[in-house]
Image: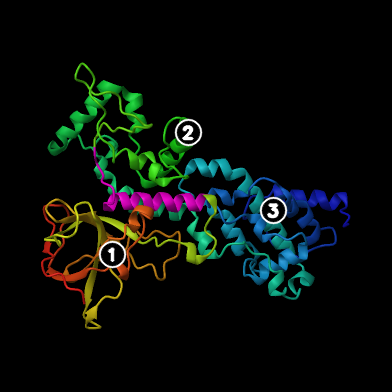
Amino acid sequence: MRTINLRSMILGLLLCSLVPVGSLVAEEPTASDPSPGELFDQRILPIFRSPKPSSCVQCHLSSVDLKNYILPSAEKTFRSLRDQGLIDVEQPRQSKILTLIGMGNKDPDQGARLIHEKMREAEYRAFECWIVACANNPEWRNLPPLKPTEIRTPERPVEVIRHTRKSRLADSFARKIWSQRMRCFPCHTPHEIDPANPRQAAAVKTRQKLVEQWGEEAVAEFSFFKKTPEETMAYLIQRSQQAKPDELPMLNLDNPLQSLIVRKPLSKLPAKQADGTFAAPSSKEPVTHMGGLKMHPDDQSYKAFISWIEDYARSVDGSYISVEDLPPDNWRGTQKVLRVSQLPETWEVGLPVQLFVHVWDDSHNAWSERPIAFTQGTVTPRQMINGALFELLNDDDADYGESQTEEEPTLTGGRYLIKVYPDHRGRLKEEPSLLLGEQDFAGQLEFSKSRWRDGFKQAPMISAAELQKQ
């Protein structure tokens, strides 16, 4: 066992704990300086042996921990990190592993930054001090590479690690759920109300009635759409963790279909009492909603909500193992609506149908291979489908966790092809977030549109009377 002299230990602790992060100056090592091995024992091994998770949990829901990069041996840990490009021996304080540890400083969640600040700073200081010592030691700098089988890496691929980042989840939330928030206006969206706008006079009145009936505190509790998507997501997660035993959680990770954020807008008004007033809405079975029906099973919003909650649940429980397990995360909600009429009479009312939009590609003189948008709805009694479109962003080269909300819109006008996929096999009942494939293809329709406008009234109406299966 390596023996550490008292003077070296004190110097190491002073060097790593009293100097502000980022202010260490690389100097030639002296005989009195702690060796890289001694610093590793003093500062890195305690992180490796600690039963507590590292500061990685601030930014990641699962799949990674700082311990995943540490080996019991100081030399092998250094070689493993160096061989992966995580240590830069020429510019040690610019090493990638330090950048990764410091990512928590950029977290927009101030509360999370404060909670993990002490641990994050300790980890950063320990690794910076040790890496500088390694880089300044010629013997360590020139250590031979490890065998590939000896390199210490996280168990999950980097794509899975990035997918479980909270920033990626928040971006997905903004595109799939936040974009649908006006379905909940004005009861759950106080920040969308503009008292100075005469068109919102009814919304202002509705909020006033809610406060009069339920009180400020209760109204604030169910006003869950906050000023930003990040705040809203954090609030929903917190509310879910604090759910009463007899109530459904806002986000049900065991059964996403039983999430209150889904069940409420699918539920009817509470029953009327003897005096003609409505009973209080219920958050337990049977669920009732004072706003009544705001969403329908199998419509585009229902699909988006379920898709996001399922993804969140799997990110939390660590069930994503490989890249193949990851769901597509390239949906972006829009206010553009597509309507298809004159569907086949044999299609029963309530049948879920998915519509995929392809665009004409002049450069290849052909329709785009991948769709640029889709929606989902159910057949109405008038044999129609209506649905707001989700644009499908090009995620072929996307960096997981980076915001995709600023991409240019794809629905800008031109020639379009609608491919129609009815769910005759009932697959969506078992997998609500599923995108149907060729086995469900019923036909396609062509149309042109010079400009897409938001809203139901501006939606193109396409007839399916000449649905062609080509």
Q: Nearer the viewer, residue 300 or 436?
A: 436
Q: Mark 3 or mark 1, which is nearer to you?
A: 1
Task: Say if the magenta span includes residue 205.
Answer: no
Whether label 3 touches label 2, CB < 8 Å: no
What type is the residue that disc 2 sits on?
Gln
x and y percent of residue 41 in the render? Answer: 79, 54
Work out whether mark 3 precedes mark 1 in sequence or the reverse, and give the earlier one. 3
Could you tell me residue 435's position as x and y percent? 34, 62
Residue 14: x and y in percent read 75, 48
Q: Are marks 2 and 1 in contact (CB under 8 Å)?
A: no
Left or right: 227 with respect to 143? Answer: left
Give the vertical position of 108 relative to 399 (above or below): above
Instruction: Residue 79: give its label.
Output: none
50 w.r.t. 214: above or below? below
C-alpha separation, residue under disc 2 versus residue under disc 1: 39 Å
Q: Can residue 7 be seen at all in this image of the molecule?
A: yes
Q: How far from the left and from the top, in percent, is residue 332?
A: 31, 58
Indicate which disc, 2 or 1, sits on the residue closer to the N terminus.
2
Label 2, on which residue?
A: 242
Toward the bottom, the furthest residue is 364
| Label 1, residues with CA under 10 Å away: few <14, some 14-19, many ≥20 | few
> Residue 311: within the magenta?
yes
Residue, disc 3: 126
Label 1 belongs to which residue?
A: 408
Q: Earlier in the sequence, mark 3 or mark 2?
A: 3
Quarter of the view holding residue 152: bottom right
Amino acid beneath label 3: Ala
